[in-house]
Amino acid sequence: GQSLEQPSEVTAVEGAIVQINCTYQTSGFYGLSWYQQHDGGAPTFLSYNALDGLEETGRFSSFLSRSDSYGYLLLQELQMKDSASYFCAVRASGNTPLVFGKGTRLSVIA
Amino acid sequence: DAGITQSPRHKVTETGTPVTLRCHQTENHRYMYWYRQDPGHGLRLIHYSYGVKDTDKGEVSDGYSVSRSKTEDFLLTLESATSSQTSVYFCAIKPGDTGELFFGEGSRLTVL
């Protein structure tokens, strides 16, 4: 089976940096993904890490350590619009479906 | 835009009635998925399809069936809806070989 752990809630100040952690336990590992979901909306893809290291996309970065079964999403220069839920998801192999964590609700405050 | 639509977007039904949700894609992707989302549970996989007439169960498949007779359509059926199936249902497609899924806008189902 597969399980993922991520904090349920995080609060951060506008303009600051926040890190959302994700640890996983899987029978196999193909890659770690991150999704953003605003209230009432659909999840949207943010990033994907298959290899160790940091991937940067604008204000968002994602990190993976396969040896530690750990990854994180880093959001810089936080904006109010970043208030949303963030989900990590893993795939055990190339053709198996994504399994999602329960999500982290990020609140950005002024 | 991934070209994925779900219908209906909202539905209220009564316990014991059958319900079918439709997912339609215009991109001709092989893989399609149905997830349900409930507070505190994140997204949980119900069923998925890896081709026409090729489907498999997910984590929470009990009480659900699916069909895929055409590449573009993936149907989710609740044979006899129960209140525990009140949820938001998301369809998704996998356009490539990464961890990227494109989700539909969701179908909110309420079973009274």
Image: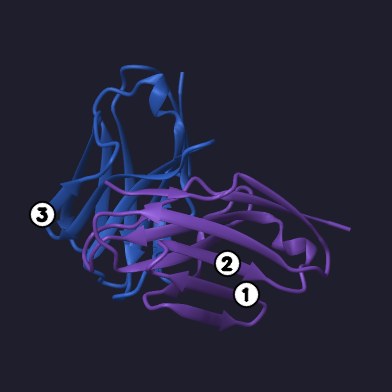
Chain colours: A purple, B blue
In front of the other: label 2 or label 1?
Answer: 2
Label 2 is placed on what type of residue?
Answer: Leu
Q: Mark 1 lies on which chain?
A: A
Compared across the picture, whether B63 is left or right of A98 comes to: left
Q: Taking the image as drawn, is residue B1 in sight? A: no
Mark 1 sits on what residue? A60
Percent x, y for residue B105?
A: 49, 54
Mark 1 → mark 3, Cα distance in angstroms? 39 Å
Percent x, y for residue B24?
A: 32, 58
Label 1 is placed on what type of residue?
Answer: Phe
Residue at image point 77% right, 74% down: A77
CB within 8 Å, label 2 to label 1: yes
Residue at image point 34% right, 74% down: B98
Secondary structure beneath label 1: strand
Percent x, y for residue A51?
A: 38, 78
> Which image quadrant is residue A67 in?
bottom left
> Which image quadrant is residue A108 in?
bottom right
Q: Farthest front residue?
A: A67
Compared across the picture, whether B12 is left or right of A57 comes to: left
Mark 2 sits on what residue? A73
Pick the residue in front: B96 or A25: A25
First in sequence: mark 2 vs mark 1: 1
Mark 3 sits on what residue? B53
Secondary structure beneath label 3: loop
Percent x, y for residue A110?
A: 89, 58
CB within 8 Å, label 2 to label 3: no
Mark 2 → mark 3, Cα distance in angstroms? 37 Å
